Amino acid sequence: MMTNQNQMERYKLYQWIHMVSFAVNDITLYLDTHPEDQEAMEYFNHFKELRMQALNEYACQYGPLTIDTASPQGKWLWSTQPMPWEGGCF
Amino acid sequence: MQNCGCAQQNPMVQNCHQQYNLENMPLAMAYVPWQHFHQVYEPDKALSYGTIFPELNKPFLGKRGVLR
C-alpha cells in the first residue's frame, strides 16, 4: 500500500511535471513568434530536459503518464493501471 | 494633428507621434508592441499566474457590471 509519505512524494513530482510542462508550452508560444531568440531557446532546452527527466522518473516509480515514457517489462501498465479519471493520478 | 492629447495623460511623452513615429501609419489599426525576452517567473508561480512572462500577467481586477 502507498504510504502517506510516498503519496506526498508522488504528488509533488506530479505537480512539478505540471509546472515544467507549462513552462515548455509557454516558451514554445513565444518561440513561434521569435524563432531567432537564443535566450528563449536556452530556456526551452533547459525546461524540456527537466520535463523529460521528471516524466521518466514518474514513469519509473509510478507508471507512465505519457506513451513515450512507457517501458513495459512483463506487464502493460499503460492500460492496466487506473486511468486519471479513475483516481489513477490523484 | 500635432497635439494628439496623449501628452496630457503622460507628461513624459511630448508628442506620441514623434516618439513612436506614427505619422505614416494608417489610422484605426491596432499595433502590438514587440515582446522581448527579459525576466521570467519561476515555474511554480508561472503555472499559477498562467504565464511565465511578468509583462503578460494581467489579472482581471474588475467586478461584474462595476466600473473599476
Image (cartoon, coloured by chain):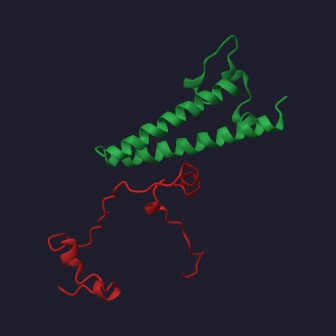
The reply to whether residue B6 is visible in this rendering is yes
- Which quadrant would residue A17 be assigned to in this image? top right
Residue A64: horizontal and vertical position, in percent? 64, 26
In the picture, the quarter occupied by the N terminus of chain B is bottom left
Of residue B29 and residue A40, the one placed in the foreground of this image is A40
Residue A29's x, y, as percent? 41, 47
The chain displayed green equals A
Residue B60: image quadrant is bottom right
Point out the residue furthest to the top here: A74
> Residue sitting at 14 percent across and 71 percent down?
B24
Which quadrant holds the C terminus of chain B? bottom right
Image: A68 above or below B47: above
Instruction: Pick out the residue farthest to the left.
Output: B24
Chain that is coloured red in the picture: B
Between A75 and B12, the residue placed more toward the observer is: B12
Q: Quadrant of residue A35?
A: top left
Q: Is residue A38 left or right of residue A74?
A: left
